[in-house]
Structure formats: structure tokens, C-alpha cells
Image (cartoon, rainbow, N blue to C red):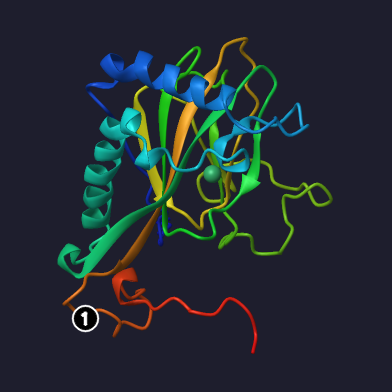
Amino acid sequence: MPVDTWFPLAIYYEDLPDAAQHRATLVKAVLDLEAASYAHRNFPEMAWTGDLHGVEQIHADPRFTWVVRQVEAHTWLYLQELGLDLSQVDLYIQRAWPVVSRHQQEVGDHCHNTAHISAVYYVAVPESGSDQAGCLTFFDDMRPNQVCPGLGGENTDIINTWNYLNQDQALYLPTEGRLILFPAKQRHGVTLNHTEGLRISLSFDIVLTAAPGQAAGSYEFLMPPPSQWRRFESRQPG
Ligand SMILES: [Fe+2]
């Protein structure tokens, strides 16, 4: 009895070969930025995220040049795998920030709504390769095989076996030196860090635009290059 499956979500990952030699520099840079940032928001169960504390431009910080180059190279490979004509697009890092998750901290579910592709790089992970420091969890909001809406939820828990045809989430074990790329609109979160160590990662939001001089601006669903935008001179009505 064949059962076909269709429409896969493409999550790209690569273990960067030079990761170990950059680890110490990146850890220090992140912790220095955290120490100099705004006062921590008062949610002890939430990991420290740079974007909420005024640290969201590490792509412009020379201490992160190596990892920015890696993100660039692998984003092109990811888009190539997705079948895009790379000559038609430009890529921008829109913002990038560190995340530090301490004991019993997590990152709640969210999407990166202002970006197209998101990347995460694991700088330092206690018990790397296990689920102990907190898994990146992707959630399936489409649920194509959930034949009755809500089936398997708290109030209608009649699923005997969770398998690849009814799974509603996919977990990635945090692995030091690994870069992961995924569609920014895919809802995701990070589970609790059960270790006593620091789980340090970097997040990147990437935007696609049309390449200047190509079909720039004529694609209904591809943003024209920012060089062709005009900012309003006025900042108020009238
Ligand atoms: Fe995220």
C-alpha cells in the first residue's frame, strides 16, 4: 500500500570545518556585547536575545566577519538547492544578533516576519549534539494530513502512533559549529536549556531582492533593490 508524501520543508545545515578555531573569539564577542547592552528584560525564563536589547547589527561588527562570510556562502547554496536563478537576486543581511540561553531558559515560538531566510549558527553548546541545551523546533502550521482540524490536540488526543505522516514538529539537536538555514516564515522556537552551561548562538535575517539591472522591480513577488527606493522627504502629514 504505497503512500506518497509531497511538499517538503527544506532545512539546510552544514557543520563548518573551521568552527573550533573561531569559537573563543565569538564567545568573547557575544558576552562583551551582552554585558554592554540595555538592562535585561525581566523574563528569567527567556533566553537573552540581542534583538530585544539593542544588539542586532553584528553583521557590521568585524568580530563576526568569518561567520557572516559563511552565512553568505551557504545561503547561496541553499537557494541553489531550492532551484532559484541566482543571477536574478541580491541578498542582504537585514539584521543579526546573538542569543544566550542559560539554565532553564528557552525561546518562545515565533516567525521572522520581516525577513525571507533565517540562519542560526551555534557558537557554543553544552553537551553538543544532545537535546540537553535546547533544541531548535520547527512547527508545521499547515498540517496537511490532519484530516479533522484539532485532531491530536489536547482535547482530541486519539492518535495512537506519532509518525512522519502526522508529526507536527521537527527538532534539531543543537550542535556546536553548525549553521542552519530555513524559511524565515516557518514558525520555530528553542526548548529549555537543561544544562548549567551557556548555549550561545547567532541569528541572521536575510532578505531577497531583485538584482539591479535585471528584471528589477518587475517581479510581482520579488522586492525591487533598495537602491531604487525613494525615501519620503517628509516625516509628517501635510
Ligand atoms: Fe528565531
Q: Is residue 75 above or below residue 191?
A: below
Give the amino acid at mark 1: Ala
Q: Is residue 217 above or below residue 93?
A: below
Tell which residue pokes out farthest to the bottom in this image: 238
Q: Give whichever of 109, 95 is nearer the camera.
A: 95
- Could you tell me which residue is drawn at 62 percent across and 42 percent down? 52
Q: Position of residue 31 (x, y in %)?
A: 51, 20
Q: Quadrant of residue 45?
A: top right
Question: Relative to residue 212, is residue 177 drawn left or right?
Answer: right
Q: Give whichever of 131, 78 is nearer the camera.
A: 78
Q: Is residue 115 visible?
A: yes
- Could you tell me which residue is drawn at 63 percent across and 60 percent down? 146
- Could you tell me which residue is drawn at 62 percent across and 49 percent down? 110
Q: Give whichever of 143, 94 is nearer the camera.
A: 94
Q: Is residue 142 above or below residue 230?
A: above
Q: Ligand 1, what quadrant?
A: top right
Q: Is residue 134 visible?
A: no
Question: Relative to residue 119, is residue 83 drawn left or right?
Answer: left
Q: Position of residue 13 (x, y in %)?
A: 33, 37
Q: Identify residue for label 1.
A: 215
Tell which residue pokes out farthest to the top in this image: 196
